[in-house]
């Protein structure tokens, strides 16, 4: 039912953990199942230098988090904001239809982390302020 790429990201997820001095943190819950995901980003020169995640969720949520962190790393903020749940799903070579909602978590948590990063900035080009 799952593609080999999903299984690979589920059994060996990449970028798991926290970034203690993250520039942005985004947590979203999935209303369908109650699962939770947090994404941490570290930004340098408008690029996502590091992206990590913590997920309390199903296998598909773990696989999509792992995949989105790999896709987002090294991208500019603008590019990262364009990653959709469909991009994540196709990068994973597809998700079963009943699991598509799980990929919302990853895309939404990344956007929430970027929103948080932007809120912390005095202006778009200045250094991130610690709160
Ligand atoms: Fe909750 Fe997949 S069932 S995120």
Image (tube, rainbow, N blue to C red):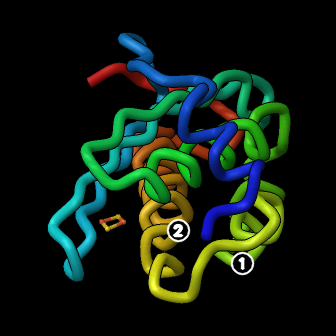
Task: Say whether disc 1 or disc 2 marks the residue closer to the N-terminus.
Answer: 1
Taking the spot 46% from the left edge, 86% from the top edge, the residue there is 98
Tell me whether circle 1 and circle 2 mark residues in contact (CB < 8 Å).
yes
Q: Which mark is residue 103?
A: 2
Q: Secondary structure at mark 1?
A: helix
Residue lying farthest front? 1
Residue 48: quadrant of the picture: top right
Instruction: Specify the quarter for ligand 1.
Output: bottom left
| Quadrant, the C terminus | top left
Point out residue 61 in the picture as x, y percentages from the top left corner: 44, 56
Residue neighbourhood size for the residue with mark 2, other residues' Cα within 10 Å, grouped as few (<14), some (14–19), many (≥20): many
Q: Nearer the viewer, residue 91 or 42?
A: 91
Can the viewer see residue 130? Answer: yes
Q: Is residue 18 left or right of residue 103?
A: left
- Above or below, 82 against 118 in this view is below
Residue 9: quadrant of the picture: top right
């Amino acid at each position: 039912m799952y593609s080999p790429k999903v299984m690979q990201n589920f059994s060996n997820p990449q970028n798991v953990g926290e970034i203690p001095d993250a520039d942005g943190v985004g947590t979203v819950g999935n209303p369908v199942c109650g699962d939770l995901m947090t994404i941490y980003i570290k930004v340098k020169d408008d690029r996502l230098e590091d992206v990590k995640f913590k997920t309390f969720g199903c296998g598909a949520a773990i696989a999509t988090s792992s995949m989105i962190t790999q896709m987002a790393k090294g991208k500019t903020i603008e590019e990262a904001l364009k990653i959709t749940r469909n991009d994540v799903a196709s990068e994973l070579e597809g998700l079963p239809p009943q699991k598509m909602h799980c990929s919302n978590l990853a895309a939404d948590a990344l956007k929430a982390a970027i929103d948080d990063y932007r809120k912390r900035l005095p202006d778009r080009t200045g250094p991130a302020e610690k709160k």
